[in-house]
Image: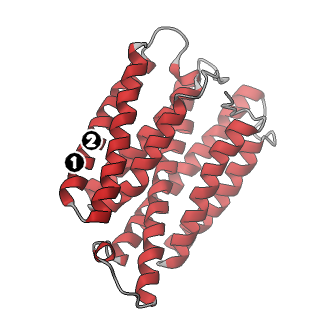
Amino acid sequence: MPFIRTFELCIIALYLLATILYFTGVIRQRNRLKQLAQTLAVAGFGLHTLDLGLVFFRPGAPAIVQGQFYISLLAWTFLAIYFLLWRKLRLEFLALTAAPLALILFTSSMAVTTERLAVPAKLSSLWFGLHVGTFFLSIALLAMAFGAGIVYLYVDKKIKTKAKLSSLNKDMPALTSVDQANRWAVMLGFPLYTLGLFSGFAWARFTWGRIFSWDPKEIVSLLIWFLFAYLFHQRLAMNWTGRKPAKLAIWIFVLTILSLWGVNFLLPTHHSLQP
């Protein structure tokens, strides 16, 4: 087995153990398990960072024209954003979203062939930084808003129905803290998504000679942008809080994931990652 494949299996093992231990720690109320899960996630993230570096500097076809590299990078971004939010807001429950998603994406990246993307050499660095980098950061922030939205709706329902709280429910964060995480993710995520979308249109102009070509990915991305813009506006101008932004963030993230898998893998598109 090649060294790089063994290395990637170690990363999967660390992410898998972190996910299992974190869920077990939450369910059984064992802080030591959650701390161990956090340590394993950090170790996996460190190896994942090294793996991306090895792939990026590997001789042969440049990593930035390979679909496999992008899926792996998106998984890495999920955890990077989680660690950032955890450090900023101390909301460890977001690991319930970040760890499984990173595991699924990284594992999926190993099944993606090295599909080459049409990136002009002179624009590759700019495109990589603006289009892909900002898109991935915004998707990772959406994932955190998704996780916060799920927890908000769950805790809010328990409170409103006056259901008896289990020991698990009592350990859940306050609604205001969860709503703050959702707001933080939306306020940062929408400008990044906007930058990623419109830099993509600029790249399309240089690559295919036109800004918009009715590509399925372009259409779905625009739909997501309008929904995201509405959520951003309502949060910023109308001071939305609570269930509405939680629900909309969940729908936007679900649509984003459907776009990633459904459009990129199943439909003919400029962004195809079909094996």
Left or right of 130 on screen, residue 22: left
Q: How is the image coloured?
A: secondary structure
Residue with the mark numbered 2: 40
Residue drawn at point x = 47 percent, y = 47 percent: 101
As helix, strand or loop, the secondary structure at mark 2 comes to helix
Q: Is residue 123 above or below residue 37?
A: above
Q: Which of the two residues, 40 or 241, is positioned nearer the viewer here?
A: 40
Quadrant in which residue 203 is drawn: top right
As helix, strand or loop, the secondary structure at mark 1 comes to helix
Residue drawn at point x = 66 percent, y = 48 percent: 259
x and y, in percent, of residue 104 in the image? 49, 42
x and y, in percent, of residue 141 in the image? 46, 53
Quadrant in which residue 112 is drawn: top right
Residue with the mark numbered 1: 36
Q: Is residue 222 above or below residue 126?
A: below
Residue drawn at point x = 70 percent, y = 56 percent: 223
x and y, in percent, of residue 2 in the image? 42, 13
Q: Mark 1 touching mark 2, by CB under 8 A?
A: yes
Q: Which of the two residues, 203 or 77, is positioned nearer the viewer here?
A: 77
Q: Which of the two residues, 19 or 138, is positioned nearer the viewer here?
A: 19
* Picture disc at residue 259: none
Residue 240 in view of the camera: no
Q: Which of the two residues, 16 or 154, is positioned nearer the viewer here?
A: 16
Instruction: Give the distance between the C-alpha atoms of the residues marked 1 and 2, in whole angstroms.
Output: 6 Å
Left or right of 225 on screen, residue 34: left
Left or right of 181 on screen, residue 67: right
Amino acid type shown at disc 2? Leu
Amino acid type shown at disc 1? Leu
Q: Is residue 173 above or below residue 129?
A: below
| Disc 1 residue crowd, few under 14, some 14–19, many 20+, Cα 10 Å | some
Quadrant in which residue 199 is drawn: top right
